[in-house]
Image (spheres, rainbow, N blue to C red):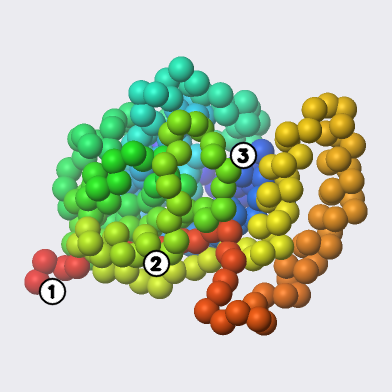
Amino acid sequence: MPTFTEAQLDAHEAMLVENVFQTSKWPHFDLLFRDIRRHAGELSPGATVVSLERGLLYGGVSLVAPFFHAQNFISVDCSPESADERGGYNAGQIDDPRTLRVPTTRRAPIEATGLEADQADLVLVPNLVHHVANQRALFGEMARIARPGGSVYVFEALLRELHQIPDDYLRYTPFGIQKVLVEAGLECDDYEVEGGPFSAIGYCWIQALQYFPEPRRSEMERWFFEEHWPDLQKWEEAHRENLVRKHTAFPVSFSVVARKPEANS
């Protein structure tokens, strides 16, 4: 993989934030980018990173590979055969001069990735879990390819519409992911969350606007973004805790880090 400058990486991230993940409207993904940059900065040069993702959507490109240019990066496109007909329909989102194009290393089903066991210092699973039909195989593969003492990072959205139909299977909570990771033989660290009820309202409105036909949709988008979106963003910052119901929260996304135990532990 080529070596990239920090300026190039910042520009690539800005492209992803603006064009692909659109975090100004979909704050689910702010957490993902913070985590990706942190993990890339903390890993030693030459460490092995395995990323399980869906590169087919973007023309066979790994969106996160450039951030790990100092590491030995292996990306596996886990797109199922059912996605072939749709192909790279999101490739236009990265048709931008800021894009750092790193092809995925291989395409393989999660049941047969061809990866060696105990090789990865870090296994990345960014926004993939809900698209995999064989959950047992997915979590087993995370545990298998991580080296003893290595880490597994999972990012998932809690709030999403049905998308990439029919390859959208389930939604986990942080506690559900932790349970499955432990059952796969991993030890979980704490989880992090992003967003709250007001960003959830905003996300649902943004999805709902797509159901209006043009030109009504453009009119409704102006109404929402000019008159209501600023208030939702303001309230999101001001009101972070449910004051009526204890043991309740409404994040829109989360991430979890797990570790593979050392052989002698």
Q: Is residue 25 visible?
A: no
Residue 62 lies in quadrant = top left
Task: Identify the residue under disc 1.
Answer: 265
Instruction: Tell me: 83 left or right of 88.
Output: left
Amino acid of disc 3: Val
Which mark is nearer the camera, 3 or 2?
2
Q: Identify the residue at the far front of this view.
A: 245
Task: Identify the residue under disc 3.
Answer: 20
**In-front residue for pair 115/183:** 183
- Counting from the top left corner in percent of width and height, residue 155 is at 45, 55
Which mark is nearer the camera, 1 or 2?
2
Amino acid of disc 2: Phe
- Counting from the top left corner in percent of width and height, residue 91 is at 57, 26
* Mark 3, secondary structure of its residue: helix
Using the numbered discs, state the Cα–Cα distance from disc 1 to disc 3 in whole angstroms: 42 Å
Residue 175's disc number: 2
**In-front residue for pair 83/6:** 83
